[in-house]
Amino acid sequence: MTGMERARKHSSKRDAILRVIQSTVSHPGAQWVYERLKSAIPDLSLGTVYRNIKLFQEERQVISVGVVNGEERFDGQTAPHPHFVCSGCGKIIDLPCPEDEAVRGMAAAVQQDFVIDYRKTVFYGLCGECTEEPTRLVP
Ligand SMILES: [Zn+2]
Ligand SMILES: [Zn+2]
């Protein structure tokens, strides 16, 4: 394999990882991305997925939503938008709420003294499925 072929193979892995993250609204973790790609890219390793996600974060192509149930979760949609995290099943949902005046005002105030890299708004609680009565268990 020539250096050029190797570089192309390397970047196609990279592209595939980014595409998977950008093509879902499930805010996946590295393990999920790896599971999705390993049949198509048999020589892919979980370490490669982690390394590339780290790079995407540095390039601001992917953002971290935070650690949910012990796993860091990522988002390919990088424009600031609020999230809801279900503490029951670990689901992360994009909230359609428009950014309100208060948040904009706060950002403007902070910006006077600091350089803001990014900000995030996360609501924690239980999703509809997790608050439902477990009817299955009732005789
Ligand atoms: Zn839930
Ligand atoms: Zn999101």
Image (cartoon, rainbow, N blue to C red):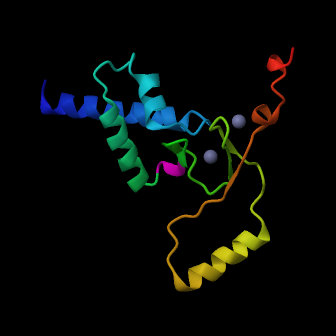
Of residue 119 and residue 132, the one placed in the foreground of this image is 132
**What residue appears at the point 39 percent right and 16 percent down from the top-left corner?**
39
Residue 36 magenta-drawn?
no
Of residue 98 and residue 126, the one placed in the foreground of this image is 126
**What residue appears at the point 46 percent right and 54 percent down from the top-left corner?**
60
Of residue 32 and residue 77, the one placed in the foreground of this image is 32
Q: Is residue 56 left or right of residue 119?
A: left
Q: Examine the image and state in which quarter residue 81 appears.
A: bottom right
Residue 64 magenta-drawn?
yes
The picture places residue 130, in percent across and down from the top left corner, at: 75, 34
Main secondary-structure element of the magenta-colored stretch: strand
Considering only vertical position in the picture, is 131 above or below 125?
above
- Where does the magenta region start and end? 61-66
**What residue appears at the point 50 percent right and 43 percent down from the top-left corner?**
70
> Which quadrant of the figure contains the C terminus?
top right
> Which quadrant of the figure contains the N terminus?
top left
Q: Examine the image and state in which quarter residue 123 appears.
A: bottom right
The picture places residue 80, in percent across and down from the top left corner, at: 62, 57
Task: Count how many numbered circles sit on residues in the image.
Answer: 0
**Farthest right residue in view:** 139
Of residue 47 and residue 42, the one placed in the foreground of this image is 47
Considering only vertical position in the picture, is 62 above or below 134?
below
Considering only vertical position in the picture, is 119 above or below 73?
below
**Farthest bottom residue in view:** 113
The picture places residue 89, in percent across and down from the top left corner, at: 65, 34
**Farthest left residue in view:** 2
The picture places residue 115, in percent across and down from the top left corner, at: 50, 76
**What residue appears at the point 53 percent right and 51 percent down from the top-left corner?**
66
